[in-house]
Image (cartoon, rainbow, N blue to C red):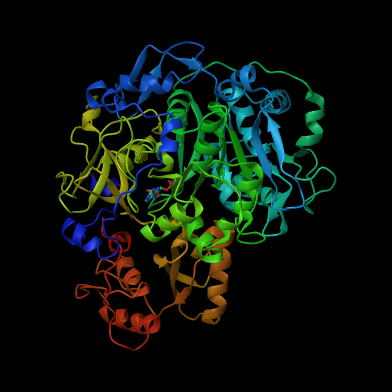
């Protein structure tokens, strides 16, 4: 493997925990069986499906997913591997995503709610957007994008919006034209948005004036001005900023509109009232969208997702794993600004004609009963959220669900490993022991689920994502590319041996990084066009139990999973280095009972700095919020006399992570400055004896030498 090129910071196999050690944290749990009432109505109960998706039937098995869509032209080649690892699915096929998610639902579901928007302000009643409304609004917006902005197939557009119905409307309008959208999470700062605008080469930015967050109206338009400036610095001129209006009768932003550049969407749309736009028939392998995600090194990566493969995969998994029927009211509490929202709020559910709920605000606003009141009021029967949200709702209102009359048939968790204790609360209290749980493991790059139980067919095991999805063939390797078989009781690097339709196509503008990061680690022949030679390296540690269930242990690289969202350490460190007093910065993850992991920052100052440590810490926190956003805010910024370093000058983040997590930092004799480690330990942990605690896998693996 060309290790130097790879972003993966795999650890020494010897230093890995065995399953027995892991069990110190989480024991193997008893299994739970799906409720017969659920099984009776489930979409997937046919036991022959396992054989249909067995490796011998790959890749043709995925026709079953693609056949859920309406194609303008059927494909000729199911999987083209001739440019491996740049996979092409359903080659020769043509379709339009907005047609599949909107137009084709009109015949049977015209006046059914496609989206229900729930304001954070409880005094504002929910707003239902029927499929007919959605059709009209998507068409009008598509007309605006085409005729007012001059956008055409293949152009990129950056969308920086919170959770409002206008966000999926905008996405679907782009999809109607074959315009590639890049949605940036609304909580990211203007600067973070600007660098993504530049990377994607978008000349149009679509935003909103403001939105509710924790009871306050946030002036979101202010971020657009920063984003445009940052994009310009990075070499991309934004020609137009389109600003949606959050409120009908008032402005949510005090930031002035820039003449000739900024336009209120709601005003411009009037010119396009009732205008219909033919959906552009797109090749299956044309890009549908970019979604930026963090890696260990460098700037965020624009993961490029396809049209046909992606839509087929999210539709198939939404149908069989989320168990979505057109009659269901489905609520995924993720944000559309992350991949979960793209796949499982917008594209999967709408392709199946479901009703998808969009909640604007904080789940615990104004109190810990809010989520369950929404579920009761809207008759939600499928619920989807993250372990962080589950832990938070449990902590703030353990008995709140009991006060409301809703009934979930199925519930999903995604984004982080879930502790069995939190799982059981979700199952027993939220799901009243009736709803099935699917713990779905996957990533931004993957388009859709990779591991999960099949809800009506497989028993559930708390803390374990479960068996691989249909048509997904994983393998767990050690660092030396030796397979760790199921039941071996050892952790290793989980890889997927085969491509699948939802897999991303490349990193926008950086195909070499795509190959280096995800495929070179376990590829043995870079000229091979046989998919068997290209295992996809996920960057997660995992164990595979003898019963076939996979337990994900967390990242094995320098990515921190904060509340289910990936943040790259290097990105946070670069933000710290924008503070003039800072000479060096190191970011490490610490275990947090609610948010999973949160970043902690170590700083060494330049000589002669006059500012106090408290002043520098405040500046560092502000810099992180400015460059990335509040989501990356560190728990603590520690100013230390020096960084522990190897003789070649590399900062030993592993040692800092151990100290921050009250762990033993192991052998430091080879460091250039071992004495500083003890100074830092005393500063962080106090003068008592060294604490020795077994660390979770990702913390132990953190910052390992590449
Ligand atoms: O470490 C895994 C964790 O989240 C990472 C992917 O993050 P992101 O690309 O932001 O996508 C999140 C939602 C798909 C993975 O590398 N992860 C995701 N789901 C699970 C998980 N860890 C354990 N169990 C899961 N169910």
360 or 514, which is in the foreground? 360
Q: Which quarter of the rendered picture does the C terminus lie within?
A: bottom left
Residue drawn at (19%, 46%) of the image: 546
Inspect this view and state whether residue 158 appears: no
Residue drawn at (29%, 50%) of the image: 551
Residue drawn at (38%, 52%) of the image: 297
Task: Identify the image quadrant of residue 117.
Answer: top right
- Tell me if 518 is positioned left or right of 491 in this view: right
Q: Which quarter of the rendered picture does the N terminus lie within?
A: top left
401 or 579, which is in the foreground? 401
User: Residue 210 at x, y = what percent?
Assistant: 72, 50
Task: Identify the image quadrant of residue 418.
Answer: bottom left
Position of 240 relative to 110 (above/below)? below
Position of 24 relative to 432 (above/below)? below
* Direction bottom: furthest residue: 687
Q: Report the label total.
A: 0
Inspect this view and state whether residue 667 appears: yes
Position of 92 relative to 459 (above/below)? above
User: Residue 596 at x, y = what percent?
Assistant: 43, 61
User: Residue 452 at x, y = what percent?
Assistant: 36, 41
User: Residue 604 at x, y = what percent?
Assistant: 43, 74
- Tell me if 703 is positioned left or right of 509 in this view: left
- Tell me if 532 is positioned left or right of 68 in this view: left
* Direction front: furthest residue: 36
């Amino acid at each position: 493997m060309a290790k130097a090129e790879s972003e993966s910071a795999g650890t020494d196999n010897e230093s890995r925990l065995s399953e027995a050690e892991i069990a110190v944290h989480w024991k193997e749990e008893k299994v739970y069986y799906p409720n017969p009432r659920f099984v009776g109505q489930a979409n997937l109960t046919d036991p022959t499906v396992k054989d249909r998706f067995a490796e011998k039937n790959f890749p043709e098995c995925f026709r079953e997913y693609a056949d859920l869509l309406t194609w303008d032209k059927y494909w000729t080649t199911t999987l083209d591997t001739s440019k491996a690892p740049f996979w092409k699915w359903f080659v020769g096929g043509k379709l339009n995503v907005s047609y599949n998610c909107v137009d084709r639902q009109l015949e049977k579901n015209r006046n059914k709610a496609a989206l229900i928007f729930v304001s954070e302000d409880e005094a504002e009643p929910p707003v239902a957007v029927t499929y007919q409304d959605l059709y009209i609004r998507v068409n009008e917006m598509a007309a605006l994008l085409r005729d007012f902005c001059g956008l055409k197939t293949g152009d990129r557009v950056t969308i920086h919006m919170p959770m409002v119905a206008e966000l999926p409307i905008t996405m679907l309008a782009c999809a109607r034209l074959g315009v590639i959208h890049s949605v940036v999470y609304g909580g990211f700062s203007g600067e973070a948005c600007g660098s993504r605008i530049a990377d994607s080469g978008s000349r149009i930015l679509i935003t909103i004036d403001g939105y509710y967050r924790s009871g306050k109206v946030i002036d979101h338009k202010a971020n657009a001005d920063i984003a445009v400036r940052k994009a310009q610095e990075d070499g991309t001129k934004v020609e137009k900023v389109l600003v949606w209006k959050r409120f009908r009768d008032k402005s949510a932003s005090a930031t002035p509109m820039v003449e000739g550049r900024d336009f209120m969407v709601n005003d411009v749309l009037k010119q396009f009232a009732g205008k219909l736009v033919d959906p552009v028939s797109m090749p299956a392998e044309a890009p549908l969208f970019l979604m930026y995600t963090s890696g260990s090194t460098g700037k965020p990566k624009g993961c490029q997702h396809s049209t046909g493969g992606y839509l087929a995969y999210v539709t198939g998994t939404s149908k069989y794993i989320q168990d979505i029927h057109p009659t269901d009211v489905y609520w995924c509490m993720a944000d559309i600004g992350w991949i979960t929202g793209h796949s499982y709020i917008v594209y999967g559910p709408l392709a199946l004609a479901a009703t998808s709920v969009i909640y604007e605000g904080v789940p615990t606003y104004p109190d810990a009963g809010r989520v369950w009141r929404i579920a009761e009021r809207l008759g939600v029967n499928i619920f989807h959220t993250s372990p962080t949200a589950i832990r938070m709702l449990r902590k703030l209102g353990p008995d709140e669900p009991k006060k409301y009359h809703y009934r979930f048939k199925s519930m999903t968790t995604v984004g982080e490993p879930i502790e069995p204790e939190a799982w059981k609360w979700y199952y027993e209290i939220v799901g009243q022991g009736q709803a099935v749980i699917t713990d779905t493991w996957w990533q931004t790059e993957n388009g859709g689920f990779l591991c999960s139980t099949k809800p009506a067919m497989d028993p559930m095991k708390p803390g374990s994502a479960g068996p691989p999805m249909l048509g997904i063939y994983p393998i767990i390797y050690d660092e030396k590319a030796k397979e760790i078989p199921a039941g071996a009781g050892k952790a290793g690097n989980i890889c997927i041996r085969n491509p699948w339709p939802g897999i991303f196509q490349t990193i926008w503008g950086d195909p070499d990084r795509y190959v280096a990061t995800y495929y070179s680690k376990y590829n043995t022949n870079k000229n091979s066009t046989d998919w068997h030679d290209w295992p996809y390296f996920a960057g997660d540690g995992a164990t595979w139990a003898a019963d076939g269930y996979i337990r994900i242990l967390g990242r094995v690289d320098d990515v921190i999973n904060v509340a289910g969202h990936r943040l790259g350490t290097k990105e946070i460190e670069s933000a710290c280095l924008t503070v003039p007093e800072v000479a060096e910065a190191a970011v490490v993850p610490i275990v947090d009972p609610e948010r999973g992991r949160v970043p902690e920052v170590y700083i060494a100052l330049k000589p002669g700095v006059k500012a106090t440590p408290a002043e520098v810490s405040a500046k560092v926190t502000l810099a992180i919020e400015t460059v990335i956003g509040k989501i990356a805010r560190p728990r603590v910024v520690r100013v230390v006399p020096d960084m522990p370093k190897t003789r070649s000058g590399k900062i030993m983040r592993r040692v800092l992570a151990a100290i921050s997590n009250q762990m033993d930092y192991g052998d430091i004799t080879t460091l250039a400055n071992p004495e500083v480690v003890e100074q830092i330990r005393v500063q962080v942990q106090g003068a008592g004896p060294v604490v020795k605690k077994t660390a979770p896998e990702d913390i132990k693996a953190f910052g390992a030498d590449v």
